Image (cartoon, rainbow, N blue to C red):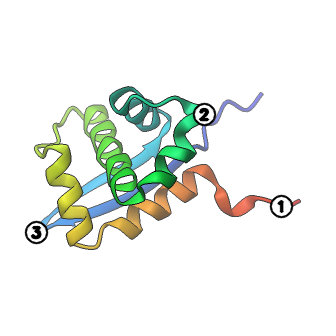
Amino acid sequence: MNTTNTFRGEFEVAFGKKKVKGAFTMNALRLVMKNEGIKLEGFDAYVGEDPLTAIPTIGYYSCISEAIKTGKELKMNKEQFIAEVLDNGGLDAISEAVAAALDTGSEGKA
């Protein structure tokens, strides 16, 4: 029985000279749903309704999840993180990580 969890999309965003690592994982997804008040079945709608908020928010909780696992703390609030991501080009890295975790490119493949 294979118990490997392949739900993972890693990324790194730069804020000035500081780089922050994140990974969209099951725990990051849990943090997004818990803190944003959404259910799993509403996740697609959440992302589709306002991607300029949703994608950076997913990135924020992905970075928090990684920081928790390493015993560190993300010293940036959510709105500050979103502003930095949108204004400094981090949106693509997070979007690609989310797509990798969800494996959206494999639809229709045999």
Q: What label does residue 30 carry, if any?
A: none
Check disc 2 and give the amino acid type: Glu
Q: Regarding mark 1 in the picture, which secondary structure is present there?
A: loop
Q: Nearer the viewer, mark 3 or mark 1?
A: 1
Give x and y (percent) for residue 85: 25, 63
Circle 2 — which element? helix
Task: Measure how far apart labels 1 and 2 are at the Cα level.
Answer: 21 Å
Residue of label 1: 108
**Number of the front mark, 2 or 3:** 2
Residue 95 falls left or right of residue 78: right
Q: Nearer the viewer, mark 1 or mark 2?
A: 2
Q: Quadrant of the N terminus?
A: top right
Q: How many marks?
A: 3
In the figure, is residue 7 to the left or right of 38? Answer: right
* Residue type marked 3: Lys
Query: Badge 3, how many Cα within 10 Å: few under 14, some, many 20+?
Result: few
Q: Where does label 2 land, which residue?
A: 41
Q: Residue furthest front?
A: 49
Q: In the depicted view, which residue is nearer to us: 60 or 21? A: 60
Q: Earlier in the sequence, mark 3 or mark 1?
A: 3
Q: Which residue is mark 3?
A: 17
Counting from the top left corner in percent of width and height, residue 49 is at: 47, 52
Q: Residue at x 20, y 45 (%)?
A: 78
Residue 74 quadrant: top left
Q: CA distance from mark 3 to mark 1?
A: 41 Å
Q: Are marks 2 and 3 in contact (CB under 8 Å)?
A: no
Res. 2 image quadrant: top right
- Label 2 to label 3: alpha-carbon separation: 38 Å
Q: Of residues 77 and 101, which is closer to you in this image?
A: 77
